[in-house]
Amino acid sequence: MLDFRALGWKVKATRCATRWRYRRLVFPGWEFYANAGAEGTLFDLLPNAVVFMDEPTAIEAEQEHWWEKVVQRHEQSLVGKPATPEDIYLPPDEWNALFARLPGGSLEH
């Protein structure tokens, strides 16, 4: 016969340990690192997606500035090598190459 009190204690202790580990791993901005090291992108999960880029000239003008800001903030964060900006985001040249292969188009106002 099972001793449910002992089993309940074990489950409770395991839950507490899991909560403690979870709190240590979760920090503000963790969602940006959730896909670090992933081999694919969202577009690999949606192979038939049609993608339209709104204001491509405005995006192109800001792309390098945005990427420099991402790299700078990464260096300031002291996260280091476990997750580099290239592990988290597509660099501008990779983004442009990916977008060029996707079905869809661009909208300029």
Image: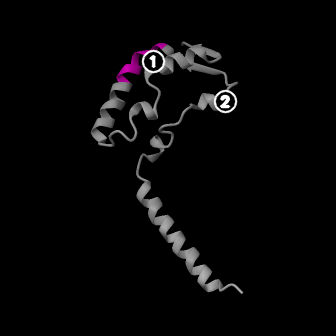
Q: Earlier in the sequence, mark 2 or mark 1?
A: 2
The kind of residue on which mark 2 rests is Leu
Check whether the beta carbons of the residues at disc 2 and disc 1 lie within 8 A of each other.
no
- Is the N terminus in the top left, top right, bottom left or bottom right quadrant? bottom right
Q: Residue furthest front?
A: 1
* Front one among 34 and 65: 34
**Quarter in which the C terminus is drawn:** top right
Q: Looking at the rendering, which quadrant does residue 44 occupy?
A: top right
Q: Quadrant of residue 80?
A: top left
Q: Position of residue 55 (x, y in %)?
A: 51, 16
Which residue shows up at 30% across the image and 32% down it?
A: 72
x then y, percent, for residue 71: 34, 30
Circle 1: element type: helix
Binning the other alpha carbons within 10 Å of mark 2 as few (below 14), some (14 to 19) or many (20 upward) gives few
- Is residue 57 visible in this depiction of the protein? yes
Q: Is residue 54 visible?
A: no
97 or 49: which is nearer to us?
Answer: 97
Q: Which residues are magenta?
A: 57-66
Q: In the rendered view, tell whether residue 103 sits above or below residue 74.
A: above
Please name the predominant secondary structure of the magenta segment in the image.
helix
The mark found on residue 46 in the picture is 2
Q: Position of residue 9 (x, y in %)?
A: 56, 80
Instruction: In the rendered structure, find residue 93 and report the number of the disc placed on it.
Output: 1
Which image quarter: residue 101?
A: top right
Q: Amino acid at mark 1?
A: Asp
Give the residue drawn at x 47%, y 27%.
90
Q: Nearer the viewer, residue 55 or 23?
A: 23
Q: Is residue 53 above or below residue 86?
A: above
**Is residue 68 left or right of 55 when viewed as pictured?**
left
Label 1 packing within 10 angstroms: few (<14), some (14-19), many (20+): few
Side of 28 relative to 9 (left or right): left
